[in-house]
Image (cartoon, helix red, strand yellow):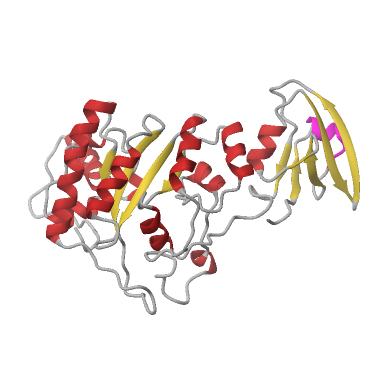
């Protein structure tokens, strides 16, 4: 693991850090003897009323002892959020969208991130395959909730095959740990026809039933395939019949879960409705639209918002006026 480098970028005038003489370019090494891995760690560790800061100034370590109110901010700003850098993904998923990017794009589009901190901060989905015991304990202690978990399948052999690694850490014990420590999470299942659909998908849903209310929602999305799949595993896209069966199964589970958990729990990506040729559910069936960034409910929410906006118009546009709405191919 990369050694944390918490370089101070700014010092707020009149703050505790300013009174200590800290300056931009100094490096925060430890708080209370613990290395500071990222901004979240800093905020958590610096909340104490009594703490020590080990700071490197001009190559020399200096120890500061501080007494402050629990709400008092130290007044430090840093050059980056992740002091040890973003954690990279060690999986080789058969459907990885990064592997399907064309050549010649900007470098950041080829970064495969697998960082639970990015999951908490920005909703990035992670497989949890690179979590250490220290990471799990930290998630529990600092209540880094909710997280966004790429489940795909709960059958270990199937999940390992999807992730492209022979021995990924077992997922369910990790979810047991998170739920047992009050951490909430969203689950994602990327369905690949012939791999994790059918009975495997049915088992996945059944295995996840034990996690509400910590499990907030399950997003079911079809595998996304581009034309840039040279030397990648052959995958089959959804056809109309399979998409219809998948939607119908999810609707049946929604009815069951609504009675059991007070939530529909499982939500289907818009693309599956379009492929199946089925109408979208009404907007309230998406509850809080918590999976919209995963392509779940994006079109129904747009149509709802459009209807509300149009209802505020007092006049009808003159005949002959035209409007253009740009959509993707599936629409």
Is 14 placed left or right of 110 in the picture? right
User: Is residue 20 found inside the magenta-colored segment of the image?
Assistant: yes
Occupied quadrant, residue 72? top right
Residue occupying image coordinates x 75% and y 36%: 12
User: Is residue 241 found inside the magenta-colored segment of the image?
Assistant: no
**Placement of 236 over or under 47, stated as above or below:** below
Residue occupying image coordinates x 49% and y 33%: 183
- In the rendered image, the quadrant that contains the N terminus is bottom right
Residue occupying image coordinates x 24% and y 39%: 305
Q: Position of residue 68 (x, y in %)?
A: 78, 22
Q: Position of residue 28 (x, y in %)?
A: 79, 44
Residue 114 visible in the current orientation: yes
Is 224 placed left or right of 319 in the picture? right
Is 222 placed left or right of 136 in the picture? left
**In the image shown, does 270 or 22 lie closer to the viewer?**
270
**Placement of 105 over or under 150, stated as above or below:** below
Residue 312 visible in the current orientation: no
**In the image shown, does 5 or 21 lie closer to the viewer?**
5
**In the image shown, does 318 or 149 lie closer to the viewer?**
149
Residue occupying image coordinates x 23% and y 50%: 270
Q: Outermost residue toward the top?
A: 69
Q: Outermost residue toward the bottom?
A: 230
Q: Position of residue 126 (x, y in %)?
A: 47, 51
Q: Which residues make up the magenta segment?
A: 14-22
- In the rendered image, the quadrant that contains the C terminus is bottom left
Q: Position of residue 23 (x, y in %)?
A: 83, 44
């Amino acid at each position: 693991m990369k050694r944390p480098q918490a370089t101070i970028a700014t010092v707020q005038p009149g703050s505790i850090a300013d009174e200590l003489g800290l300056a931009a370019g100094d490096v925060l090494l430890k708080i209370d003897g613990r290395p500071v891995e990222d901004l979240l760690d800093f905020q958590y560790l610096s909340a104490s009323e009594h703490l020590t800061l080990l700071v490197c100034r001009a190559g020399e370590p200096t120890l500061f002892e501080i007494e402050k109110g629990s709400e008092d901010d130290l007044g430090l700003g840093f050059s980056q959020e992740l002091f040890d850098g973003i954690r990279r993904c060690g999986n080789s998923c058969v459907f990885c969208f990064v592997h399907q990017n064309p050549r010649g794009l900007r470098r950041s589009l080829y970064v495969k991130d697998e960082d639970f901190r990015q999951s908490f901060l920005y909703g990035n989905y992670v497989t949890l395959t690179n979590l250490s015991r220290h990471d799990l304990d930290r998630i529990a202690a600092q209540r880094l909730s909710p997280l966004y978990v790429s489940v795909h399948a709960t059958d270990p052999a199937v999940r390992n095959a999807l992730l492209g690694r022979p021995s990924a850490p077992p997922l369910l014990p990790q979810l047991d740990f998170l739920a047992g420590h009050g951490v909430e999470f969203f689950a994602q299942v990327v369905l690949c026809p012939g791999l994790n659909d059918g009975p495997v998908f049915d088992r996945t849903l059944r295995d996840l039933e034990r996690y509400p209310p910590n499990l907030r929602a399950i997003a079911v999305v079809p595998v996304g395939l581009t034309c840039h799949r040279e030397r990648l595993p052959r995958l089959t896209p959804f056809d109309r019949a399979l998409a219809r069966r998948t939607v119908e199964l999810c609707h049946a589970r929604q009815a069951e879960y609504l009675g059991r958990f007070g939530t529909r729990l499982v939500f289907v990506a818009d693309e599956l409705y379009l492929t199946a040729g089925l109408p979208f559910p009404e907007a309230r069936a998406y509850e809080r639209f918590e999976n919209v960034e995963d392509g779940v409910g994006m079109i129904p929410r747009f149509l709802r918002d459009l209807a509300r906006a149009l209802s505020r118009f007092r006049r009808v546009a003159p005949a002959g006026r035209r409007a253009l709405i740009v959509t993707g191919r599936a629409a």
